[in-house]
Image: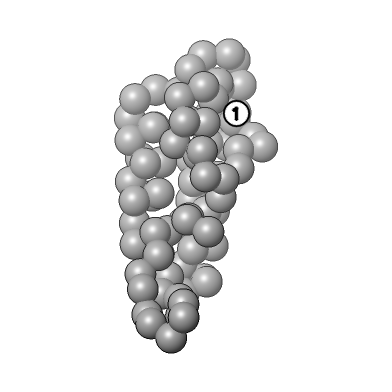
Amino acid sequence: MTNERVRHVNRIKGLLFGQGVSGCESLRRDRREQLEVLQTGDGRLLLAYLKAQVNRELDRPGRRSQVNGTLRLKGLLNL
């Protein structure tokens, strides 16, 4: 399950790196708001289709965790 989360995080980093974006923290709580202000390597805002791809990766189901004796499904990158 951790491997799945790592795969999604690496996919997001790869999508952004291909546009010259580095240093994006995809595990932060404000990651969706962060997408709105990120700029490509040449100073342009991210294109809508790229934001949509990253948001789809963020929306993928995450891992299961044991909390207080009950199992619950956590969002992909919600920590």
Q: Nearer the viewer, residue 20 or 74?
A: 74
Residue 48 appears at what percent x and percent y?
34, 25
Residue 32 appears at what percent x and percent y?
44, 36
Residue 69 appears at what percent x and percent y?
43, 86
| Residue 61 appears left or right of 26 | left
| Location of mark 1 (residue) | 20
Looking at the image, residue 51 lies above or below residue 10: above
> From where the camera sits, is residue 58 visible?
yes
| Residue 38 appears left or right of 61 | right
* Residue 6, quarter of the rendered image: bottom right
Q: Point out the residue furthest to the top here.
A: 43
Residue 12 appears at what percent x and percent y?
49, 46
Secondary structure under tag 1 reads loop
Looking at the image, residue 15 lies above or below residue 37: below
Kindly identify the residue that appears in the image at 39 percent across and 22 percent down: 47
> From where the camera sits, is residue 7 visible?
no
